[in-house]
Image (spheres, grey):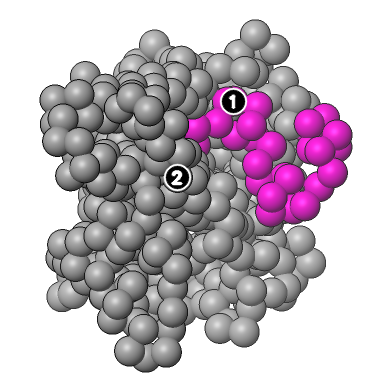
Amino acid sequence: MSGDVVLRAEDIHKSYGKLQVLKGVTFEIRKGETKVIAGPSGAGKSTLLRCLNLLTMPDKGRVWLEDIELTDPKVDINKMRQKIGFVFQEFNLFHHLTALENVMIGLTKVKKMPKEEALRSAKEALLTVHITEDLWHKYPAQLSGGQKQRVAIARALAMDPVIILYDEPTSALDPQLVGEVLQVMKELARKGVTGLVVTHEIGFALEVADEIMFMYDGKILEKGPPKEVVFNPKHEVTKKFFEKIGRLYGERR
Amino acid sequence: MSFWEEFLPALFSGVITTLKLLAIAMPVSVALGILLGTARVYGGRVARVLATAIVVIFRGFPLMVTLLILFFGLADFGIYLTPYWAAVIGFILCSGSYQSEYVRGAIRSIDIGQSLAARALGMTKMQEVLYIILPQAIRRALPGISNELIYMIKYSSLAFVVGVPEMFSVAKTFNSQWFMPIEIFMTLAVIYLAMTTAATVGFKWLESKLRIPGIEITTR
């Protein structure tokens, strides 16, 4: 595997019963890159993302993180998942823990970090996503959607992951809260945090992504520089999709 | 000696015996309930089958029958339990089985996203259950669990069938000697009422102490 490739998926297949969701997806992502996966719903975007940290087990195909094959049954997947941040559409913050505890629990229980050190890392991660001290001791139910998602990003970030996977991170948010989450994601991308983002936010893709992969019907139909894929796609379905998305999401950046 | 001079000290020692039964049976039954409820959702095949069998049996048997089996039945196999321990074990098995159903329901009511997020962080199944699932499930199950424990205070009177000198058996004995049912059983009832009321207040306090915004633990 070449030098700075951090994640590589090869020929990923996944079916649910007769429904073929993924029909052979191959791609790789290098250190520091941000790649966006776009495509109509049902194209297999979320399933693909979950196949990468094996929350969903692919039927066929292989996944590597750095030089370790995750799909190798001998690999301790729990250990490897520590290195893959995952941000969910529905945030999935732990309801019984405060913002700070949500970020700390992976450090203290999974990474077995001493409490002092975990506290320091957690606070740093929260500040990185602009969650200020007044919110640290609030429970998820006391936070807005945008704050929850930023805490969720901090939870992933604090683990010092090789890559963060974002599964439609702004789709469950009220429109006025989308901006603050996208802002944080852009800042992370610019800092060189490797990210793979399933999103309909084309503005985000155009601004910070190194590449857009357009998924259609369980495959990557085309990929390339964001401007190319959005404004000058090779396929008619891609063109139609981005026209429609453009109308729906307007000029949001 | 007058009736009251004799009755009250005897009843007092009965109350102490009842409290001694509850002091062990209550906490251990909660532990058993959590263990059984968790095993039925997260256990391997063997643990699941075993836990289910325990729950089905001890929820299905009348408690009095369970107590008689523990005390007299086990003796046939050379297992001699004292009345006290037969009663404590019977209460634990019965109440723990009921409580496990609240725990199981509470675990099942937790949305799958909590589990996915725990796994995505790299938690093992054990860590997920201990640090994420149970702290939430126990809070949700608490009203049901406290209900069972309050119920246990009252059915602790059944310990008389295996000869534990708890407060009900003291009252019963006195009534057969003195035949003063109003005085005797009203006094007894008031003590039970005081115990259940104290327990109710205690559990309400515990519920409010453990309350976390967004996790409903009280049914209103």
Q: Residue at x 28, y 81 (%)?
A: B73
Question: Could you classify mark 2 by the number of other residues whose Cα lies within 10 Å: few (under 14), some (14-19), or many (20 or more)?
Answer: some
Residue B46 placement, left or right of A165? left
Farthest-out residue, front: B1
- Residue B173's spot in the image, x, y percent? 25, 46
Instruction: Write down the quadrant of residue B12 in the picture.
Output: top left
Residue at the image position 30 percent from the left and 63 percent from the top: B162
Looking at the image, residue B36 lies above or below residue A146 = below
Question: Residue A130 lies in what quarter of the image?
Answer: top right
Task: Note whether residue A59 is visible.
Answer: no
Q: Is residue B197 left or right of residue B129?
A: left
Residue B135 visible (yes or no): yes
Q: Residue at x 34, y 31 (%)?
A: B7
Mark 2 in CB contact with mark 1 (< 8 angstroms): no
Q: Position of residue B130 (x, y in %)?
A: 54, 52
> What kind of residue is marked 2?
Thr
| Quadrant in which the N terminus of chain B is drawn | top left
Which residue matches tag 1? A99
- Residue under numbered circle 2: B17
> Which chain hosts label 2?
B
Is A170 placed above or below A210 here?
above
Q: Is residue A207 above or below residue B124?
A: above
**Residue A25 image position (x, y, % from top left):** 42, 68
- x and y, in percent, of residue A227 in the image: 48, 37
Q: Main secondary structure of the magenta part?
A: helix
Q: Nearer the viewer, mark 2 or mark 1?
A: 2
Q: Amino acid at mark 1?
A: Ala
- Which residues are the magenta region? A93-121
